[in-house]
Amino acid sequence: MSSLTSKLYSYKFFLPAAIVYILFFLAPTFLSFFFSLTIWTLSDWKFTGLDNFKIFLTEPQLNIGLRNSLIYAGATCALKVVIGFLLAAFLCTDLKTRGFLRSVIYFPNILSTIAVGIIFSSLMHPSKGLINVGLAAIGVKGPDWLGNPRMALFSVVLVDVWKGVGIAMTIFIAGIMAIPQHYYEALMIDGGSAWHKLRYITLPLSRSSMNSVIMLAFIGGIRSFDLIWVMTKGGPGFTSDLIASIIYKQLQGGFYGISTAGNVVLFIVVSIIAVPMYRYLTKVEVDL
Amino acid sequence: MKRKSFALVAALALVALTGIQAADRTKLSWLQWANEPQQKAIDAVVAAFEAKYPIDIEFDFKPGSSEGENLVKTRLAANDMPDLLTYNSGSLFQVLNLEKNFVDLSKEPFAARILDSFKSVVSAGKGFYAIPYQPIPAGGILYNKKVYAELGLKVPKTWKEFTANCDKIKAAGKVAVIVSYKDDWTAQLLLLADYYNLQAAYPKFAQDYTANKAKFATTPAALRGFEKIQEMYTKGYINKDPMATTYDNAQTMLATGEGVHYPMATWVLASINQNYPDKINDIGFFAQPGDSADKNGVTLWMPTNISIPKTTKKLDAAKKFCDFFVSAEGLAAYMSVGAPDGAFAIKNVKMPDSLFPATKDAIAYINANKTAPALEFLSPVKGPNLPQICVEAGMGLKTPAECAAEYDRDVEKQAKQLMLPGW
């Protein structure tokens, strides 16, 4: 096969996927860049420049979403990385119930987010929910998980971590299992303890899986919507609103222009954070 | 070959059968709210209609409140509308571009039977575009008559009398005012039902508000609404765990007498009747009191409506249904499942004697002409974040003045998006 034929041949394979990608992703993205500069309804539109962005970024009811999304993403990412890593390190040792425990911890991840949200909403009822009833049985007065404006966001963070730590753990397990045994053998010869094993071999050599988990968890956290919506709808008041729930509320109110602008802001925030983060993290990776 | 020809024959037979069925009866599709407390009554009307005409009605249920509104707007954009549509009246309906999308009903024979006040909230230009689908809900305060009798309380005619009653109820160890903030739309009622009092103090508020000349933060009578919501919290009248209490929980508390007052509209009576039919007679209704006893009246919510999208292919069948729904026969079928919970927006309806006590209380105000429509029917401006702002006031998260200012900013966004003049 001549090189020209082989070049054209490979493009033909690319074409169907390219068409779907352009039609359903690229084109709407660029259209939304345009429409975020207008006020639009289902029947007509009016160009207004950067007004929508100004409103979105200056309104306290709206920019609280930006702040909350960053807190939410940071908290879920940190918890998933730490807890996921520790669970993975523990479940890579020789345990009889290793397989069973891994499945149990992974299980919440396959549940529907909406179902998890509804169940935890009722578990977290301040006086009749099982969590506070259980705490009361041991003499601790449980807080108002979803009704206290300062706690609501963190309660949802905890549920999100409960649901998502399984995937983090799985990625870490894959990374840890790939570490060659000769490092551990060398450590045993030098007389290292389990702590040294974890800190000086397992941790640095799982950098690449840690990078994946950090990226996935952080970006997923910024874009998160369904759990907050089902559990608090952004309440009480506006204290647990995220960017995505604010965008949805603007849409419900018929403010299509502001909602599109919000989406563009979300796109920009994710890009601004994700791209440098990825570059920095991969620089620090250590080769096996 | 045998299998192929058999399949072909079977397919042709099926097509022929369905063809024959379709030729007999027309089918209308109706996009309806799911879980409507009025659904039994609607089913009775539909059953009577299907018995009378060769027309079948097929329901397509959509979720309530804003999710359902989004669904309708999406289907409108995709030109995928049913033959009949249920929707809220007032400004929510009027933004759907009525003249372009719906059938004008003003030349129909049944148009004369509908109250003018209803026509005004489903109109655009010279025509009107929908029929009322339920009795007129009145907004105010529902109360438990048994507890009132026990504690020797009288229906309050001023706000001071109301809070005095609440103090007595609190002293007796019961919940004075039930709030259900988990369903945040219910937090708005205390503010919106106050409109009668607002209008009595400032008759031109609706026009000035729409033209950006009056605001909630700077109009003391309007600020009262937010103050009243927060007063319930600061005086300790509300139930515990307000953020976890739902609309359903609130109905249970009211019916059993655990809570004595519930700021709500009479549309809740149908579902209390469904769940607590033996307690429905314990519930009464009074208008939200203002500051003086002679200016006391109810705020009315214009009922939800049924409209005919222009894209329907079965216009005659749809019009026949609308005509039937507002006729004496249709209303009789509606009332056959139980007493209605309010007056109808239709002229000359004979109401049964078995009305709920709360309904009779509400109708008394309507007959005495002490009513005002809710603000959302007089002005297209209603900020979408009002439920949450009311919850903020109701939980003491912000002062009433801050909430009013917040709502004014919210409303400003909406007015600009609607491209209203003067903003």
Image (tube, grey):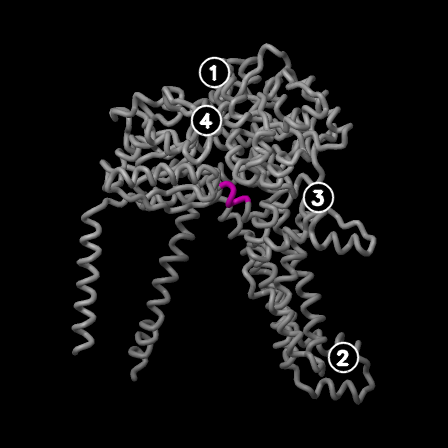
Residue B173 spot, x, y in % from top left: 76, 32
Q: How far, Cα to Cα, is label 2 from label 1?
A: 84 Å
Residue B239 spot, x, y in % from top left: 70, 36
Q: How far, Cα to Cα, is label 3 from label 4?
A: 37 Å
Q: Secondary structure at mark 3?
A: loop
* Chain letter of the residue carrying label 2: A
Q: Quadrant of residue B393?
A: top right
Q: How far, Cα to Cα, is label 1 from label 3?
A: 45 Å
The magenta region covers A246-250
Q: Secondary structure at mark 2?
A: helix
Q: Quadrant of residue B289?
A: top right
Instruction: Check the image and report above or below for B88 versus A227.
Output: above
* Chain letter of the residue carrying label 1: B
Please report the residue visible at 52 percent of the width from the left and 35 percent of the height from the top.
B384
**Same chain, labels 4 and 2:** no
* Chain letter of the residue carrying label 3: A
